[in-house]
Amino acid sequence: GQGEICYLRGIGKPYYNLYLYEYGGVAGNPDKTYYYDGKKYAGNTGDPARGMALYGVKVTESNQNLYPGANVGDKVYTTDYSQASRFEQGDALPKLSGGFSSHLQYKNFDLTAAFVYQLGGKFFGIEYGSGFYVSEDWIGTGLSEELINNTWTEKNTQAAFPMIMYKDTKSNGSTFGSKLYSDMALFDASFLNVKNITIGYNLPKNLYNRYNISNLRLFATGNNLFMFTSHSGIDPRMSLTGGLDIGPGVYPYARTFSIGVNIDL
């Protein structure tokens, strides 16, 4: 099924080898050549599928008749999502992950910072793809800021992303299929997270030594303060295996702040 097989496994391949459809841009853009209903179009004002998403197709002996002029083994693009082919998109697992911390102290002040990082891997933002569907049971889906004013309309024909579609089973491309599971929503999973920063101040002992207190420290701490990723709106920490197991509506890690007092007797 179009939304079922997410990884292609085999000898010599990574276990989490992503196997997704390939997004080919928007039909109607001047630089896009594609097939529609058995005919080839070069992206002009006369093409019948302007604004629809394009998908990569592997030309085989069984489907070659749909793509006149193409040879077996070629990769072409079509608006027919039911003909889309899956392609290997790389290993979801990172090459390296870990963390590090630093502690600085000057007179009565101290500063501690902890970081978490990941290098490599792929992350699939399912809500990025699902944002192209609108229906009575899919209201409130979060949209990436990149999609705002950057989807195809009659007045915005050079948009990088296809038109928004109403989700029903009769509209070409508007069901949960290729557009949702294409590499349009696949990003580099590298990140750097500022996990914690804590600032402390040890009060002078002459302020409290009469109360049998050996040390009095004020502090302020913040968790999950900053997240640097390859693309805004994604959080690769949500999944180690490419994000394909993350459903819509998942809440990201919260950013928290607190202040306190450490008293040593």
Image: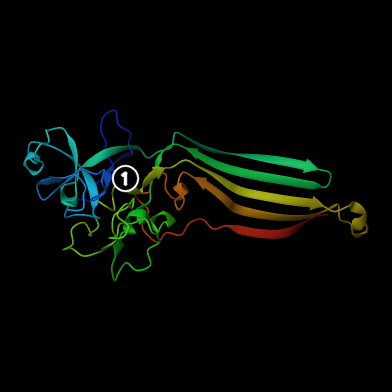
Left-right relation of 11 to 69:
right
Residue 133 placed where, x, y %? 29, 62
Residue 98 placed where, x, y %? 53, 38
Q: Measuring 18% from the left and 63% from the top, which residue is drawn there?
A: 169
Residue placed most toward the observer, 97 or 231: 231
Residue 199 placed where, x, y %? 72, 50
Residue placed most toward the observer, 157 or 213: 157
Residue 95, picture quadrant: top left
Q: Measuring 51% from the left and 55% from the top, which residue is drawn there?
A: 253
- How many numbered discs, if any? 1
Left-right relation of 46 to 95:
left
Q: Measuring 62% from the left and 49% from the top, which residue is drawn there?
A: 196
Give the residue at mark 1.
Answer: 183
Number of other residues with Cα within 10 Å of mark 1, as a class: few under 14, some 14 to 19, many 20 or more: many
Residue placed most toward the observer, 155 or 96: 155
Most extreme residue toward the bottom is 136
The disc labelled 1 sits on which kind of residue?
Asp
